[in-house]
Amino acid sequence: EHVKIPSEKRRKEAIRNAGFNTFLLYSDDVFIDLLTDSGTTAMSDNQWAGMMLGDEAYAGSKSFYNFEKAIQDVLGYKYVVPTHQGRGAEHLMYGHLTNPGQIVPESVNKSINTSSE
């Protein structure tokens, strides 16, 4: 499927029509879905091809090094720990980098998840 980028005008119109409720947006009006980490939007033909052609080696795969470099280039992080989903990342962070009773403030949409799960 070809994934198109809706114009800024269309995106603003769509979010207004949805009453600023991201759960009421049509997927065609969303280019990058940051609402969840569940991958609910369409994948492009290039993304599907990448999955079929990916290096699935258990360790040392080219796909990991490509991913790592992209994260480093875009976000500037030196270290990258890929996780299967946000909950897995939260488990690593909250379970190993904090102490019991410690509060970790976040600025994210948590409509279906809590860090205590």
Image (cartoon, rainbow, N blue to C red):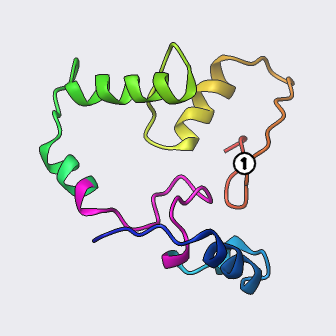
Q: Quadrant of the C terminus?
A: top right
Residue at 22%, 19% in the rendered image = 59
Main SS class of the magenta portion in the image:
loop
Location of residue 55 in the rendering, given as x and y in whole percent from the top left corner: 16, 33
Residue in front for this viewpoint, 106 or 66 = 66
Q: Secondary structure at mark 1?
A: loop
List the residue tagged with mark 1. 114
| Residue 42 to residue 84: above or below | below
Q: In the displayed image of the protein, which residue is found farthest to the bottom?
A: 17
Residue at 17%, 34% in the rendered image = 56
Start-end of magenta stretch:
28-46
Residue at 53%, 52% in the rendered image = 37
Q: In the displayed image of the protein, which residue is found farthest to the left?
A: 53
Horizontal side of 25 relative to 57 (left or right) equals right
| Residue 23 to residue 111: above or below | below
Q: Amino acid at mark 1?
A: Thr
Location of residue 5 in the rendering, given as x and y in whole percent from the top left corner: 47, 67
Q: Quadrant of the N terminus?
A: bottom left
Query: How many numbered discs?
Result: 1
Residue 20 within the magenta-colored segment of the rendering: no
Residue 42 within the magenta-colored segment of the rendering: yes
Horizontal side of 88 relative to 14 (left or right) equals left
